[in-house]
Image (tube, helix red, strand yellow):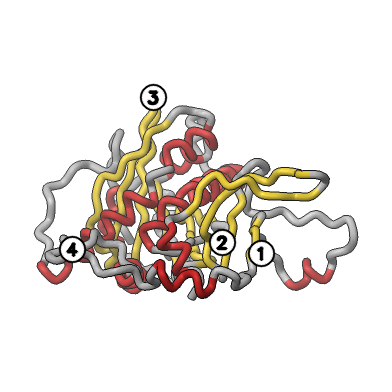
């Protein structure tokens, strides 16, 4: 059993920076970049979800035994499972205390968590993930998408959800959202396998070049040879996951709820790679997409492979 602790106003108290082994230094730097990208747009997303102004900052990245984190937090704990649907594999766990879970649910007056709080937390974190995906695209040189999250409320004497165990060693990205009389502390777990995948995708800063950069992989002079080649373009309005029994019940007039809200930008894919975002427009009774952001020309060339 994990012993009880006395909650503090800010649960993530500052610690002196731990010694980082040279072999883990590069991983630590990569995960710091990932954490900054993941939480980059969390402030506006939480502001919209909670209807209260919030600014989010990353407090740091540490490697800890999961038990150490839980000893800092007031139980019951809320574990939000964040699973990659595209671009990466594996899952994160967003871990918050009871007080911070209630704040994520937009309820700072209630003491106990109930099912309506779980649904509110699920909605808030889904909005946070929708905002996190675009900043991670240049970091990974590919788009990422997340499945709808699941929320678990765990009492102090209960087993942890999924395959988690108190003695697991994980990387933690700690972040804090602060606003008018409100503070929300969040911890995002990254297991060793997912950390290795993040680093392999080039989440570290490039080494300074000692020599002039090599020419582009596809020289401009050779682009003319393929300018008349046609490529499939797909516009993704949103995604959903359904059980087979629900799919079999579909009929004309059925409505499928997607993972995007009305007014959210749609993504433009070429060769299954996201290259742009835009908004849906109607031109002469036809649907179209007005582009609002687009990746660099170099990245667009890579989609031709």
- Camera-near label (2 vs 3) is 2
> Badge 2: how crowded within 10 Å, few (<14), some, or many (20+)?
some
Q: Position of residue 167 (x, y in %)?
A: 29, 68
> Badge 3: how crowded within 10 Å, few (<14), some, or many (20+)?
few
Q: Position of residue 242 (x, y in %)?
A: 70, 65
Residue closest to the eye, 188 or 273: 273
Q: CA distance from mark 2 to mark 1?
A: 8 Å
* Quadrant of the image containing the N terminus: bottom left
Sequence-earlier tag: 1 or 3: 3
Q: In the figure, 61 relative to 6: above or below?
A: below
Residue located beneath label 2 in the image:
147
- Residue at x 45%, y 64% (from the top left corner): 142
Sequence-earlier tag: 2 or 4: 2
Q: CA distance from mark 2 to mark 4?
A: 34 Å
Residue located beneath label 4 in the image:
207
Residue located beneath label 1 in the image:
241
Sequence-earlier tag: 1 or 4: 4
> Badge 1: how crowded within 10 Å, few (<14), some, or many (20+)?
few
Q: CA distance from mark 1 to mark 4?
A: 40 Å
Callout 2: helix, strand or loop? loop
Q: CA distance from mark 1 to mark 3?
A: 37 Å
Q: CA distance from mark 4 to mark 3?
A: 42 Å
């Amino acid at each position: 059993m994990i012993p009880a602790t006395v909650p503090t106003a800010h649960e993530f108290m500052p610690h002196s920076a731990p010694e980082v082994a040279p072999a883990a230094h590069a991983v630590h730097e990569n995960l710091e970049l990932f954490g900054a990208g993941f939480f980059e747009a969390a402030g506006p997303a939480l502001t919209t979800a909670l209807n209260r102004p919030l600014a989010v900052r990353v407090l740091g990245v540490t490697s800890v035994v999961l038990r150490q984190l839980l000893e800092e937090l007031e139980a019951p704990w809320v574990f939000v499972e964040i699973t990659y649907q595209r671009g990466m594999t594996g899952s994160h766990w967003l871990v918050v205390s009871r007080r911070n879970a209630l704040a994520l649910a937009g309820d700072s007056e209630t003491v106990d968590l109930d099912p309506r709080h779980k649904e509110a937390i699920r909605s808030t974190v889904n909005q946070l993930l929708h905002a996190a995906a675009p900043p991670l695209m240049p970091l990974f040189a590919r788009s990422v998408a997340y499945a709808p999250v699941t929320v678990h409320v765990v009492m102090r004497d209960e087993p942890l959800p999924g395959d988690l165990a108190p003695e697991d060693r994980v990387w933690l990205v700690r972040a804090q959202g602060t606003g008018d009389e409100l503070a929300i502390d969040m911890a995002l777990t990254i297991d060793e396998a997912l950390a290795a995948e993040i680093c392999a995708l080039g989440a570290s800063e490039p080494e300074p070049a000692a020599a002039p950069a090599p020419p582009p992989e596809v020289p401009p002079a050779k682009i003319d040879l393929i300018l008349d080649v046609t490529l499939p373009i797909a516009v993704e309005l949103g995604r959903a996951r359904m059980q087979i029994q629900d799919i079999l019940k579909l009929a004309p007039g059925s409505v499928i709820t997607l993972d995007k809200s009305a007014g959210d930008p749609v993504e433009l894919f070429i060769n299954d790679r996201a290259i742009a975002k835009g908004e849906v427009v109607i031109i002469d009774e036809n649907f179209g997409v007005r582009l609002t952001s687009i990746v660099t020309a170099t990245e667009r060339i890579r989609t031709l492979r």
